[in-house]
Image: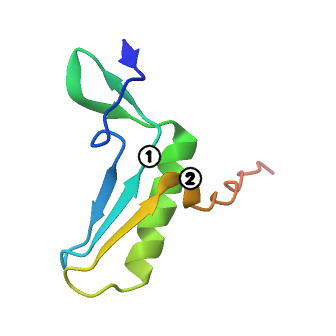
C-alpha cells in the first residue's frame, strides 16, 4: 500500500547527465510502497513536469560537474499534451 510519509531524500529527484552535471529537484510529490522502500511512483503530471525540467536542463548544455538545485513548486507546468485525432 502506498505511503505518503516521505523523507527529504525520497522527495528529491536527481537527473545526472553524461558529463556529470546534476539537476536535483526537491519536494517532488511521490508515493512509496512501505513494503519496498526502493519503489517510488509519480503521478503522470508529476512525471511529465520532471521530464520537461530534465530536458530543459540538458538543453542548457551545462558544464561538467555543474550542480543545479530547484524546488518542484518552482517548475513551470508543461503544456498540455497534444491529443491525436482520428480522421
Q: Which residue lies furthest to the top in this view?
A: 1
Q: Is residue 66 above or below residue 16?
A: below
In front of the other: 54 or 68: 68
Q: In this view, does 27 lie above or below 14?
A: above
- Specify the label residue 73 is tagged with: 2
Which residue corresponds to the image point at 53% horizontal and 54% vertical from the top-left?
49
Which residue corresponds to the image point at 18% horizontal and 74% vertical from the top-left?
20
Q: Tell me where residue 43 appears, x and y as whole percent.
A: 51, 36
In front of the other: 46 or 69: 69
Alpha carbon separation for disc pair 2 and 1: 7 Å
Q: How crowded is mark 2: few (under 14 residues within 10 Å), some or many (20 or more)?
A: few
Report helix, strand or loop for mark 1. loop
Report helix, strand or loop for mark 2. helix
- Specify the label residue 60 is tagged with: none
Q: Name the residue under label 1.
A: 27
Colour scheme of the rendered structure? rainbow
User: Could you tell me if the residues under marks 2 and 1 are in contact, i.e. CB atoms within 8 Å?
Assistant: yes
Q: In this view, does 18 lie above or below 24?
A: below
Quadrant in which the N terminus is drawn:
top left
Image-quadrant location for residue 67: bottom left
Which residue corresponds to the image point at 44% horizontal and 63% vertical from the top-left?
70
Image-quadrant location for residue 16: bottom left
Q: Is residue 65 left or right of residue 42?
A: left
Q: Which residue lies furthest to the right in this view?
A: 87
Q: Residues within 10 Å of mark 1 (few under 14, many from 20)?
A: some
Q: Tell me where residue 13 appears, x and y as whole percent.
A: 34, 51
Image-quadrant location for residue 25: bottom left
Amino acid at each position: 500500500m502506498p505511503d505518503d510519509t516521505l523523507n527529504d531524500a525520497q522527495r528529491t529527484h536527481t537527473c545526472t547527465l553524461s558529463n556529470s552535471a546534476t539537476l536535483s529537484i526537491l519536494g517532488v510529490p511521490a508515493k512509496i510502497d512501505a513494503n519496498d522502500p526502493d519503489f517510488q511512483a509519480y503521478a503522470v503530471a508529476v512525471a511529465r513536469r520532471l521530464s520537461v525540467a530534465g530536458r530543459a536542463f540538458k538543453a542548457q548544455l551545462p558544464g561538467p560537474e555543474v550542480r543545479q538545485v530547484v524546488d518542484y513548486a518552482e517548475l513551470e507546468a508543461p503544456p498540455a499534451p497534444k491529443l491525436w485525432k482520428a480522421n
